[in-house]
Amino acid sequence: MKVVLAFGDSLTWGADAETGGRHSYEDRWPSVLEQQLAGEARVIAEGLSGRTTSFDDHASLADLNGVRALPMLLATHTPIDIVAIMLGTNDLKPHLCGTATGAAFGMRRLAEIVATYPFGPGVQRPKVLLIAPPIITEPAEAKILDCFAGAASESQRLAQLFQEVASAAALAFVDAGTVARSSPVDGVHLDADNTRAIGLALAPIVRGMLHGQ
C-alpha cells in the first residue's frame, strides 16, 4: 500500500481550541484524507503541537524544530510516496522568528531535505506537497501572554511565499486557507468541521499525485 506522511504541527495533531484537547481521530485531517483515499494509501500523521519549520523554541519541553525531526521520520516510515508538509504558523511567533519570509526559508529547507535524503538503492524518492496553513485571526479574548501577538498580518503572506517556494522547486502546493478558517476562540486552531475540510480538499490532489498526475 502507498504511504503519505503528513508532517505538521498542532493543526495536523488535531488541537481543539474550544476544549483545549484533541479532536476525535476521525475528525483530524490526515484521518479524513485516508478515509477519502479509500484504501489507496495509508496516511501517517506526524503532527506535533508547536512544531516550526526550522526554528528552536527553548521555552518548550519538546524539540519543535522540523528540520531536525524530518530526517528521523523519513527513516522511520520509508518507503514513502508523498510527504505532505503543513507548517509555518508557529514560525510567526515573535519570540521565534515572527516573519512569513523566515517560514518560507524553513519550508524550502524541509523540501530540500526530502529531495536529498539518502533513502538507499531501490527506494523511490517521495513527492512533496507543500500546504499553507489557514491564516491567523484575532482571538475572541485577549491574552496576557499571547505567543501569536502581531502574527495575523504575517500569516496572510504565507500562502504566496509558500507557493513561490513550491513553484521554484516544481512541487505541488495547496493553500488550506481557501477551505478552512481558524477558530474565533483562539484565532489559530481549527474546529472539527474545518480540519475535516482540509482532508476533503486534499484528497483529489493527493490521489492525482499517487497516480502520477
Image (cartoon, rainbow, N blue to C red):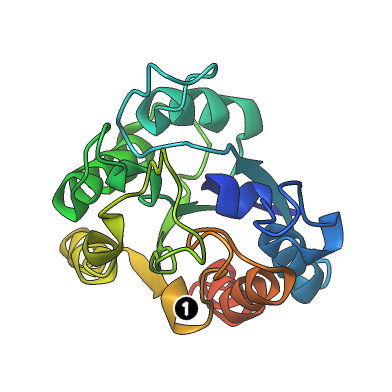
Residue 119 visible in the snapshot: no
Which residue is rendered at x = 41% and y = 38% of the image? 145
Which residue is rendered at x = 31% and y = 32% of the image? 54
Q: Where is residue 45 in the image (x, y as percent from the top left)?
A: 67, 46
Which residue is rendered at x = 58% and y = 46% of the image? 10
Label 1: element kind = loop
Q: Which amino acid does label 1 sit on?
A: Gln
Residue wearing tag 1? 213
Q: In this view, does 101 lie above or below 202?
A: above
For residue 36, side relative to residue 142 (left or right):
right
The N terminus, quarter of image:
bottom right
Q: Where is residue 100 in the image (x, y as percent from the top left)?
A: 20, 54
Mark 1 residue crowding within 10 angstroms, few (<14) / some (14–19) / many (20+):
few
Q: Quadrant of residue 114?
A: top left
Which residue is rendered at x = 26% and y = 70% of the image? 156
How many numbered marks does the figure carry? 1
For residue 196, side relative to residue 157 (left or right):
right
For residue 121, side relative to residue 76 (left or right):
left
Q: Which of 170 and 190 is in front in this view?
A: 190
Q: Nearer the viewer, residue 54 or 120?
A: 54
Q: Is residue 161 above or below residue 73?
A: below
Residue 104 visible in the snapshot: yes
Q: Where is residue 119 in the image (x, y as percent from the top left)?
A: 47, 29
Q: Is residue 151 above or below residue 206?
A: above
Q: Quadrant of residue 132?
A: bottom left
Q: Quadrant of residue 28?
A: bottom right
Q: Which of 86 and 156 is in front in this view?
A: 156
